[in-house]
Image: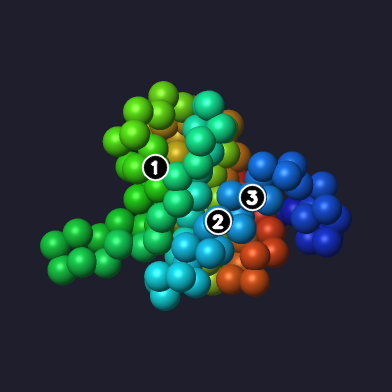
């Protein structure tokens, strides 16, 4: 867990701030429990919300990773999820690791967009 969140937010890379903002926007726009965004090795971003269909359930981060894969991404630089949860789900971290490799940062922000913690895939 990071220390003082105001310091953590001010130290965030602008590209990491961007994916948190995109994730927060997806969550709000779609009225879903989570929003997520990932950045691939070329800097392209993929944004998604929770998928909750009768026959298909994916977290926002799983959906964003799937969108990146479907679009031809070969790796991830970073991932962000905006959620009320205190930590990213293990399945979400695993999906990021599958595409981005071990060590890919997973930024977790609250619904207010404030970074809570950074996990490592």
Q: Secondary structure at mark 2?
A: helix
Choose between 72 and 51: the one closer to the eye: 72
Q: CA distance from mark 2 to mark 1?
A: 14 Å
Please state if 103 lies on the left or on the right of 94 as rendered.
Answer: right
Q: What percent of the width, then of the height, locates residue 91?
A: 38, 49
Residue occupying the point 59% across, 71% down: 111
Q: What percent of the width, then of the height, locates residue 3?
A: 81, 56
How many residues crowd mark 2 within 10 Å: few (<14), some (14–19), many (20+)? many
Choose between 1 and 23: the one closer to the eye: 23
Q: State the mark number for residue 65.
A: 1
Q: CA distance from mark 2 to mark 3?
A: 6 Å
Choose between 65 and 25: the one closer to the eye: 25
Is disc 2 in contact with disc 3, using a CB cutoff of under 8 Å? Answer: yes
Looking at the picture, the colour scheme in use is rainbow
**Which residue position is annotated with label 2?**
22
Quadrant location, the N terminus: bottom right
């Amino acid at each position: 867990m990071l220390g003082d969140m105001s310091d953590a937010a001010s130290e965030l890379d602008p590209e990491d701030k961007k994916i948190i903002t995109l994730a927060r926007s997806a969550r709000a726009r779609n009225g879903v429990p989570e929003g997520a965004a990932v950045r691939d090795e070329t800097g392209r971003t993929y944004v998604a919300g929770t998928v909750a269909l009768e026959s298909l359930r994916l977290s926002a981060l799983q959906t964003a990773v799937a969108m990146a894969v479907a679009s031809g991404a070969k790796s991830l630089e970073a991932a962000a999820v905006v959620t009320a949860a205190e930590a990213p789900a293990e399945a979400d971290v695993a999906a990021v690791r599958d595409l981005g490799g071990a060590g890919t940062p997973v930024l977790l922000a609250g619904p207010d967009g404030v970074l809570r913690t950074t996990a490592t895939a």
